[in-house]
């Protein structure tokens, strides 16, 4: 590939204008100034191009050299990603710390995924025919994840690999091998190594999209029962500051049933990333009994790191997620927060003096956002042995002033399958997760009903609907009470109100700080619903027979109901049965 | 270091705080320049943007008197820096870091870029130490920890400064640890400056204080430099000298207004309410400088104060700050009018790092539960108050009446502590006393065993 050299003609924030770049290609990278800062060509106008630069541009001046070699911005994919923490352009932050200290300096380049050798266990032999997506071998990356080495799929924008690699295996190596050395060589000479490069802005191909039919289980009652997201689906979590978006993202990264978690801290706080980095190596994954960090990849570009890299970070995250999907894993891609990505896009666009759309965002905001969310999905993977994999996207949205009518929330809503709307008033009352049950929805619910009937219980759907109805009725009654007072209500209505309160306090509220309740199994969720509904029915009967409501509410069994959360999941079913017997 | 000096007498335009200089090709983004007026006066400027043949320079001291014929600029060859050393302690500087107390300049141990560099998230250490401020609504309900950034959201005329001064006076660190205060003031009145000077003196903290002060009558553009100077000094003290540094920045609203002024002079497309679209990122480069670093002893704890225009928490200044900081302490005008000091409105207040500073070994094991319970009970009691205003007390149940009493006592006793310096034990005991107004069956956010042990109703 031919290199093109130009000279800086303007610098404004994270964008740099360059002259003399005849023949440069859109969305390829260029290196700027004497530090060789990484940039990407985002606009071409004759021989003049505009770069978005992924590092701090302070100190750049007119006339300094810019070099482009025509490569797109890529991610390096291979063993060593798991447990790693990378910045928005995939520099490993731990290695960066060792090299340049506690503060991030610019112009430091680092090898990615090359610091370690891996034991390669082949799954093909000489003479086998392979094609894109086939598994040629594995690396046991850690105790839980078998990293599959797959034949790189073809990529239109990568000059490295246009048609995709296919052919007959000529040579297979095994043993301990570095990331960039070939492990399998085909007869036409093409080599497959442990790692592959993939252009970040291009979705990775698959055979076909499958329709979502299983829930992405989170261990959080309000999500799993009321507003479930499907595996391969998209949920958005909008909310004003302090309403609990990050806690939702982090809690799901801890407890969600998923093989791999890719967590993108996009323009948020440094301390939140540190929390994950220090806690996840110690926290034990309930399903494997091993530290959570083993299934986690962190991509971090905090709010004070260069803004253009923030724009790139979500695509790095999506590409890593798809890469593991292609191995046949279920992957959760957590984004906190997509609004910071949109703001980065807006900033770059305004520096290029593009015509602004609503709230200053570029008119292509919705399209870009849509393309990004489309990278979620459950798919049949390329290659042999019929793997299916999924990418589920959970994306936080930070609307200014907590007002959901703004462009990023609205554009996200158009493509999301589930909305978990966080409410400031609930957060003020410390009702967490502060999910507004009136505003939130799940479009997946109907297609997941079968799963609940089959995997949980025959009455699971019925109970859920009862809970929803009770919440609705409580809402109506509450409005009445605000005019006439509780005293004026009939006992049956007061009972409904009390039960509504129990549903909210005991079932919907779930504190991450309560060890017994932070993660709730499906079984516990089901039995909690069952207890509440049975209590409601029994109490209604009793009132019909003339028992005073006060007496019912003061009964020991009511108190036990109120304290149900504190019963750990593993003994819940048994204790629930006791409670229900007591109700008789 | 080059010996060449670049001088340009080619100012082609002036707009607000900006000048446009043609042909300044040797300049670089962020570089400092000296603007020389024909009167011999020298001012400081900084290159904001480079366009084909044109440099955009913001002038700290303002542009009045500058002309396009005889004024010239000289490139300084470096970005904005200040000299730092331990001798800064006890000194006063102006808003861009020059001595303002009439004493000779300090002899710097190092010259540091005021913009600083982002802390590598992999190098951060998780905040973990409780800071006792002696204020119940903070210690009990919104605990501050070392390395946190916790702003005070104030309104015009509300006593944010008094609270900040009280924190400075009362904040305790374990004996033997090095402790200092960095004070950055943007656009404060001389009355406020006087108040803080007094407060530092009274608390005996003057020798441990570094102050950077931009007064209300000082040029607005200088305000963009003040918090950065302050944080550079703080980082030096914390991460080079092992101090636990408490940084107070006031008033971030003046800072944001200066930012808006530059934005409009550059004819940028304005964001919400005219503030620049990059204000979130800009504020983050200030607030994110708080923290702890692995392997270093010190810490930077940041308490910015901002005035919410019109008491509006959704105003971009408060909103964007809240999106970056680790919680907020919100002041309430209704409480202030009732004569309650400190008038902290606990419901919108939050400390996100609270959990790292409380619990068995740090405060008490029931702390989290008790705080959550006080919150939800207070929220409920405020609803009850509203209801009572509509339907009158007669329509209320006995339970409602208990909640009403709870609300009054909570505000009067727990919140309204006045100048008292309360230990965390006193705060938590008081919490139980007020919770005990309610029947114990209401206290479901606290584990049963604790309710049995501490409930006194
Ligand atoms: N499930 C939960 N259980 C207990 N506390 C919670 C829960 N969710 C949120 N919180 C509380 O709310 C605080 C704020 O949550 P979080 O930091 O997730 O907000 P956010 O929406 O991400 O805010 P921002 O947009 O400013 O980043 C937390 O520090 C915690 O105290
Ligand atoms: Mg957050």
Image (cartoon, helix red, strand yellow):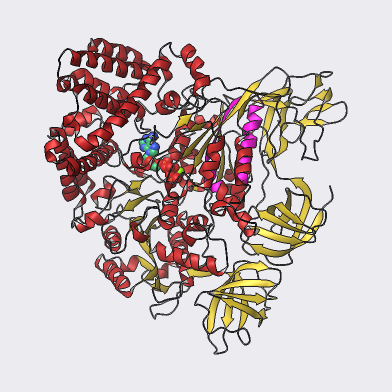
> Image point 79% across, 53% down: which residue?
A24
Q: Does residue A77 appear in the picture of this structure?
A: yes
Q: Main secondary structure of the magenta part?
A: helix
Looking at the image, residue A388 sits to the left or right of residue B294; the answer is: right
> Residue B33 occupies which quadrant of the picture?
bottom right
Which x, y percent locates residue A23? 82, 53
Magenta stretch containing residue A339, yes or no?
Answer: yes
Looking at the image, residue B176 sits to the left or right of residue A110; the answer is: left
Front residue of B412/A327: it is B412
Count of numbered tags = 0
Which x, y percent locates residue A19? 77, 62
Q: Does residue B437 appear in the picture of this structure?
A: no
The segment highlighted magenta reads: A312-341
Which x, y percent locates residue A167? 84, 24
Magenta stretch containing residue B216, yes or no?
Answer: no
Which x, y percent locates residue A238? 47, 40
Front residue of A246/A558: it is A558
Q: Residue furthest bottom?
A: B39
Looking at the image, residue A4 sits to the left or right of residue A327; the answer is: right
Q: Is residue A79 above or below residue A93?
A: above
> Residue B439 occupies which quadrant of the picture?
top left
- Quarter for ligand 2? top left
> Residue A221 occupies which quadrant of the picture?
top left
Looking at the image, residue B358 sits to the left or right of residue A235; the answer is: left
User: The C terminus of chain A lies in which quarter of the figure?
Assistant: top left
């Amino acid at each position: 590939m031919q290199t093109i050299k130009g000279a800086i003609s303007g610098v404004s924030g994270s964008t740099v204008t360059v002259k003399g770049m005849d023949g440069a290609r859109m969305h390829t990278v260029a290196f700027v100034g004497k530090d060789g800062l990484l940039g990407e060509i985002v606009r071409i106008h004759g021989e003049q191009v505009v770069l978005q630069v992924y590092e701090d541009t302070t100190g750049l001046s007119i006339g300094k050299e810019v070099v482009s070699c025509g490569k797109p911005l890529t991610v390096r994919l291979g063993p060593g990603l798991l447990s790693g923490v990378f910045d928005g352009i995939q520099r490993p932050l731990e290695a960066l710390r060792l090299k340049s200290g506690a503060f991030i300096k610019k112009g430091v380049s680092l090898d990615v995924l090359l610091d370690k050798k891996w034991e390669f266990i082949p799954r093909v032999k000489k003479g086998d025919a392979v094609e894109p997506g086939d598994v040629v071998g594995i690396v046991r990356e850690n105790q839980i994840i078998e990293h599959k080495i797959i034949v790189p799929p073809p990529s239109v924008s990568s000059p490295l690999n246009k048609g995709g690699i296919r052919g007959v295996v000529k040579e297979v190596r095994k043993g301990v091998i570095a990331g960039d050395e070939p492990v399998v060589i085909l007869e036409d000479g093409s080599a497959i190594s442990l790692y592959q490069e993939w252009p970040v802005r291009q979705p990775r191909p698959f055979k076909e999209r499958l329709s979502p039919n299983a829930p992405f289980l989170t261990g959080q009652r309000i999500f799993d029962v009321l507003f479930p997201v499907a595996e391969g689906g998209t949920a958005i979590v909008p909310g004003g500051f302090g309403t609990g978006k990050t806690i939702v993202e982090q809690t799901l990264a801890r407890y969600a049933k998923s093989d791999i978690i890719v967590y993108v801290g996009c323009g948020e706080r440094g301390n939140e990333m540190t929390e994950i980095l220090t806690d996840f190596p110690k926290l034990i994954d309930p399903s494997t009994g091993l530290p959570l960090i083993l299934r986690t990849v962190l991509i971090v570009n905090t709010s004070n790191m260069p803004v253009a890299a923030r724009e790139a970070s979500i695509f790095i995250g999506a590409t890593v997620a798809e890469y593991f999907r292609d191995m046949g894993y279920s992957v959760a891609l957590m984004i906190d927060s997509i609004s910071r990505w949109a703001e980065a896009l807006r900033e770059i666009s305004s520096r290029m003096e593009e015509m602004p759309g609503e709230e200053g965002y570029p008119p292509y905001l919705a399209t870009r956002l849509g393309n990004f969310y489309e990278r979620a999905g459950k798919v049949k993977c390329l290659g042999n042995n019929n793997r299916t994999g999924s990418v589920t996207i959970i994306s936080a949205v930070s609307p200014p002033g907590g007002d959901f009518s703004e462009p990023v929330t609205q554009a996200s809503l158009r493509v999301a399958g589930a909305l978990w709307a966080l409410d400031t008033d609930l957060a003020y009352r410390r009702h967490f997760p502060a999910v507004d049950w009136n505003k939130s929805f799940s479009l997946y619910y109907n297609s997941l009903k079968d799963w609940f009937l089959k995997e949980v219980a025959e009455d699971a759907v019925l109970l859920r609907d009862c809970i929803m109805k009770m919440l609705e009725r409580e809402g109506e009654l509450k409005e009445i009470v605000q005019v006439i007072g509780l005293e004026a209500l009939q006992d049956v209505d007061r009972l409904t109100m009390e039960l509504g309160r129990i549903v909210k306090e005991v079932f919907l509220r779930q504190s991450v700080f309560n060890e017994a309740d932070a993660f709730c199994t499906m079984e516990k969720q089901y039995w909690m619903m069952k207890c509440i509904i049975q209590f409601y029915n029994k109490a209604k009967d009793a009132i019909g027979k003339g028992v005073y409501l006060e007496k019912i509410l003061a009964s020991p069994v009511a108190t036990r109901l109120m304290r149900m959360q504190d019963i750990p999941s593993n003994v819940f079913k048994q204790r629930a049965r006791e409670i229900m017997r007591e109700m008789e | 270091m080059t010996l060449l000096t670049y001088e340009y007498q080619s100012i082609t335009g002036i707009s607000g705080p900006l000048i446009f200089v043609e042909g300044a090709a040797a300049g670089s983004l962020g570089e400092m320049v000296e603007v020389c007026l024909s009167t011999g006066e020298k001012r400081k400027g900084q290159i904001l943007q480079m366009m084909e043949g044109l440099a955009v320079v913001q002038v700290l001291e303002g542009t009045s008197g500058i002309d396009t014929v005889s004024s010239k600029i000289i490139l300084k060859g470096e970005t904005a820096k200040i000299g730092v050393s331990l001798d800064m302690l006890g000194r006063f500087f102006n808003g861009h870091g020059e001595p303002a107390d009439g004493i000779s300049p300090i002899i710097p141990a190092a010259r540091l870029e005021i913009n600083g560099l982002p802390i590598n998230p992999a190098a951060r250490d998780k905040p973990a130490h409780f800071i006792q401020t002696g204020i119940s609504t903070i210690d009990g309900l919104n605990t501050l920890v070392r390395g946190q950034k916790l702003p005070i959201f104030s309104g015009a005329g509300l006593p944010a400064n008094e609270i900040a001064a009280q924190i400075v006076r009362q904040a305790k660190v374990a004996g033997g640890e090095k402790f200092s205060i960095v004070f950055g003031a943007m656009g404060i009145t001389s009355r406020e400056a006087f108040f803080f000077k007094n407060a530092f003196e009274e608390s005996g903290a003057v020798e441990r204080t570094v102050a950077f002060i931009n007064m209300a009558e000082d040029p607005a553009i200088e305000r963009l430099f003040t918090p950065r100077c302050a944080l550079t000094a703080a980082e030096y003290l914390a991460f080079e000298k092992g101090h636990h540094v408490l940084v107070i920045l006031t008033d971030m609203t003046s800072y944001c207004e200066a930012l808006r002024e530059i934005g409009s002079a550059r004819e940028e497309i304005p964001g919400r309410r005219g503030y620049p679209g990059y204000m979130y990122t800009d504020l983050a480069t200030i607030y994110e400088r708080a923290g702890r670093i692995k392997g270093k002893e010190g810490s930077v704890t940041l308490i910015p104060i901002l005035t919410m225009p019109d008491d509006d928490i959704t105003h971009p200044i408060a909103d964007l700050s809240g999106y970056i900081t680790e919680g907020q302490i919100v002041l309430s005008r209704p409480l202030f009018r009732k004569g309650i000091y400190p008038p902290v409105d606990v419901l919108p207040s939050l400390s996100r790092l609270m959990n790292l500073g409380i619990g068995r070994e740090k405060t008490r094991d029931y702390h989290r539960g008790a705080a959550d319970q006080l919150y939800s009970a207070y929220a409920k009691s405020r609803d009850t108050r509203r209801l009572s205003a509509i339907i009158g007390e007669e329509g209320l149940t006995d339970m409602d009446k208990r909640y009403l009493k709870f609300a009054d006592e909570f505000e009067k006793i727990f919140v309204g502590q006045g100048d008292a310096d309360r230990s965390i034990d006193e705060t938590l005991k008081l919490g139980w006393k007020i919770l005990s107004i309610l029947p114990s069956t209401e206290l479901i956010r606290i584990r049963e065993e604790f309710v049995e042990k501490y409930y006194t109703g």
